[in-house]
Amino acid sequence: MTKEMLIQISNCKLYAKLVGENKGKPTIVMDAGYGDDSKGWDSVISDVSMLSNVLIYDRAGLGKSESSSNSRTSRAIIKELKELLTEAKVEPPYILVGHSFGGVNLRLYTTEYPNEVCGLILLDSTPEDYRERFLPTMPKEFQQAYNKQFVSECNYDEFMESLKQLKQSKRNVDVPLIVLSAGEKAHYSEESQTLWNEMQKEISKISQKSEFIIAENSGHYIQNDEPKVVTSAIKTLINKI
């Protein structure tokens, strides 16, 4: 089954696609990285949809979705996602899968709407203390390029506000969690790569039922570099629920 939808929420229409054969398992909801639309999941969607129904969507202003007048912080984004799921009649509980900035959004979704989430998978998700702890360890050119990239979705201040919202939210989650860390990041020194993996491992501590996996041969887009690692993590999580 593949169902494409343009769903009216309070102030815009959001594009979503529901794929899969429902096997009585929770629906898997996937949120892509900064500036990425639902195509960011093309490399894994067919395999993941064999496990359960999967909903992928374009955040407001990306892909086939209209722009929203709301701010582009994580808190505003997850409210829109909640509206989308309600209007599309996709019933909870959900298994949430977030990449990079999508991981920030879905961690916040899990703490804001705990009764709707039964599992969480984070793919190289942005740590809440990224700016303070990680960015200063990188070369100046990297830092400048990082700061200039915020043009396709939320701006730099909104992104940092999202990390602050995550920090201020109740951090621990009471669901099974799998954290995947990219072990082969481009432009990272050995020291930076080690720190990155440490920070990813710290994220796994927000749940007492967590697993931490380093995708040794992956850059930031683990779903493209090692799609089987992602599918396998989702399968593992489904079996725990």
Image (cartoon, rainbow, N blue to C red):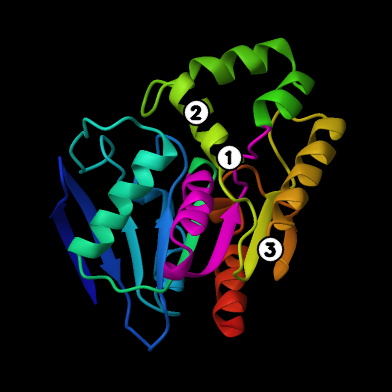
Q: Number of marks in the image? A: 3
Examine the structure image and report whether residue 113 is included in the region drawn in magenta.
Answer: yes
Q: Position of residue 58 (x, y in %)?
A: 30, 47
Image quadrant for the N terminus? bottom left
Q: Work out whether residue 85 can be spotted.
A: yes
Kindly identify which numbered label has been placed on residue 161. 2
Q: Which element carries disc 2, helix, strand or loop?
A: helix
Asked whether disc 1 touches disc 3, contact meaning CB atoms under 8 Å apart, the reply is no
User: Which residues fall within the magenta stretch?
Assistant: 102-129
Q: Position of residue 116 (x, y in %)?
A: 42, 68
Compared with 4, 11 (above or below) is above
Asked whether disc 2 touches disc 1, contact meaning CB atoms under 8 Å apart, the reply is no
* Residue ID at (66%, 12%): 141
Give the residue type at disc 2: Glu
Q: Nearer the viewer, residue 225 or 33?
A: 33
In the image: residue 125, left or right of residue 62: right
Q: Mark 3 sits on what residue?
A: 207
Q: Position of residue 152 (x, y in %)?
A: 36, 26
* Residue ID at (75%, 19%): 136
* Residue ID at (58%, 39%): 168
Q: Work out whether residue 227 can be spotted.
A: no
The 10 Å Cα crowd at callout 1, few under 14, some 14 to 19, many 20 or more, is few
In the image: residue 92, left or right of residue 198: left
Q: Which element carries disc 3, helix, strand or loop?
A: loop
Q: Position of residue 21 (x, y in %)?
A: 32, 82
Q: Quadrant of residue 51?
A: bottom left
